[in-house]
Image (tube, helix red, strand yellow):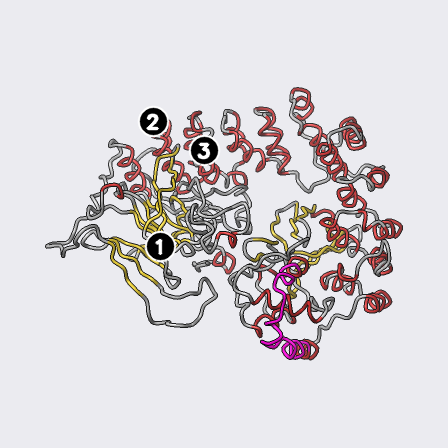
Amino acid sequence: GRVGAPGTPDERRIAIEGGIWRYHPERKIFEVLVHGTTNPWGHDWDENGELFFINTVNGHLWHVMPGAHFKESFGTDPNPFVYERMDTIADHFHFDTSGGWQASRDGNANSLGGGHAHIGMMIYQADQWPQVYRGKLFTLNMHGRRANVERLERNGSGYVGRHEPDVFLSDDPWFRGIEISTGPDGSGFILDWSDTGECHEHTGVHRTSGRIFRISYGEATKPEKPFAWRKPWPEADLSGDEHQRALAIRELVQFSPLDTIIGPQPGVQYPVLAFDPAKMAAEEKSAFVRLNLASVLQRLPLAQRPALAAALLSHKDDAHDPFLPYLVWYGVSPLAKHDPAALVQLAKDCTWPQVTRWLARSLAMQPAALDALLAVNHSDEVLEGMSEAFKGLRKVPKPTNWDTVAAASKSPRVREISVLFGDGRALDDVKAIALDDKADLPAREAALRTLIEARPPDLRTICEQLLDTRTLNMTAVRGLVLFDDPAIGSRLAKSYRKFYPAERPAVLDTLVSRPAWAAALVANVGDGPGKIARSDITAFHARQIHAFRDDALSKQLTEVWGELRESAADKKQLIEKLKANLTPEALAKADLSQGRVLYTAVCSACHVMYGQGGKIGPDLTGSGRANLDYLLENIADPSGVVSADYRMSLITMKDGRILTGVVSGQNERTVTLRTLTDTQTLDRAEIAKQEVSPMSMMPEGLLLALQPEQIRDLIAYLMHPTQVPLPKTN
């Protein structure tokens, strides 16, 4: 969720997106300690004062490292310099990740831990239970109706959670544990919501009831005095053991401002610290203490960060640590904007591959800084970082030092980057690979993608030559889309069935990007051999065709496909008609398996349900889809209420194409657009106009291409509370 904070509306909006926060009631300080995850719902400290928390879904176990950016179930980090986020510390999942999480329900994941959803957490530190449970982490598993047990062990600079046997199993379908904690007598206490529903699906029964379970070993007795079930944490001492030193570091920096999710807070005052973190980092023998010092980076003025980062990077043994590279990078990444020369100096002697790659990526778009970087470090990691930074760009100024680097390096990235820098010889080599029918297919596809980015004069000829080569033809289409020639659209429409079924939606997206090509598409809709099936055309495609405002073309579309109803009266009329047909008796006759097939065809490109599908629109699994009115209103009038995260963007390219999608990321040079079929990184220099529509990405009229019984099957499937099997095949 999001919590507000003082500042501009944008600053308030991104104050917290998931994660763990704390508040000092006397000093009135609100601070987000870590960012990300999905619905943290339970936390506790171990005997050394280390804080761990449980995530409701996805990866379930996390260690609080102040300043960390953790993975979420969707989206990108608001900070443009957070290229990669940290993952769960558990070395396992409690469900089968080879399929959707719904397949691990109803006892199917008992051997793994019961399921993907976790609520509540306790690290047991009392003596009432047997010693084997001391220090173990317990969390309640909703679908497994049990408590999962984790054994916390050191892993590099941090921790790993290892799966222990599950305990406290219940066979009561009403059991919905939501919290587990230690009581004053050392017993464990579990709060039970007591309902058969889950997430946003609920029965509405027994809203005020629930149960509390006490779990004891032997006879529980009332303590004569408060039970000291947690031993005192070690004293904070910079000369003590590693846990004492870590606590001392946290205590000494706790009132220094911590970076927000987007970086340092503007205009804040950093207090003078009572110790020298850079000196300590250089001499520190414990990776665990160095991890805490890496968190200190985000509590220092920018000018003091390079010294501490250099001291941390000097420990070559930490190069492949699972946590330190991330925290060091998060701490120094603001320097890419404020002091790129400092990052060049850090890169000079950096032996940590991930950090080197991120350093290069952050500096690649600054010509002077990139040239300085290549003068001191041209490792494969630097070239990887440059390649990541240049994604979506067609031409980049060549650094003075590039020829020397290219001659010395054996990295496969050299040819690709050289093409961006305008090297004709490299371009000829790439062409040869793309057209070599004896070459490795992945290498040919990569070469063709490089050519499409470079756009040599003969690109059209090359793409047309490869249009009939399976596995390369879809990439060739992405090259041909750059040429505004009706003949290309006609050829694509006529060769539609030569593409694999999974590729055809992308071909349709291509055809509706230009008016002349859309006309070729409409002209080829029919039932005969080689024709495009009417059912393949979605309401999304129809809306895009209507957006060209070509009356003749819209009329043709209506004749072969149908009519979009977008007025308020039409929507209301459609809803009433659907409700009249979708009676409980009619829905009871639905074929749910066929409904699942229709959902995959009509909805899954944009929506996740039961762990599978696209992420352009909201996850439908826990929505209010059991309510027919809710379902029909959202299908018939999806633009009635549109979250900012799902607003449609219309991007008009200078070459005449119109692209529709959701902007998932952007910077000064590129815009990343998530469409129905793929994600494209676009060069801003090639964009003529970018608009944000109040409309939803989901168009009206999604049901217009379906027969009445198909609508019945789809709606019944959407309303069904659990996953159903696919139709049986003979």
At label 1, the amino acid type is Gly
What secondary structure is found at the residue carrying circle 3? helix
- Residue 285 marker: 2
The x and y percentages for residue 603 are: 64, 60
Q: Residue furthest front?
A: 730
> Up-down: is 298 above or below 635?
above
What secondary structure is found at the residue carrying circle 2? loop
Can you identify the residue that label 1 sits on? 120
On whether residue 678 falls in the magenta region, the answer is no
Query: How far apart, in angstroms, are the residues tagged by discs 1 and 2?
Result: 35 Å
Q: Residue furthest right?
A: 487
The x and y percentages for residue 627 are: 54, 72
Query: Quarter of the image holding residue 386?
Result: top right
Q: Nearer the viewer, residue 350 or 346?
A: 350
* Disc on the earlier residue, 2 or 3: 2
Query: Quarter of the image holding residue 480?
Result: top right
The x and y percentages for residue 446 are: 71, 35
At label 2, the amino acid type is Lys
- Residue 306 marker: 3
Label 2: few (<14), some or many (≥20) within 10 Å?
few
At label 3, the amino acid type is Pro
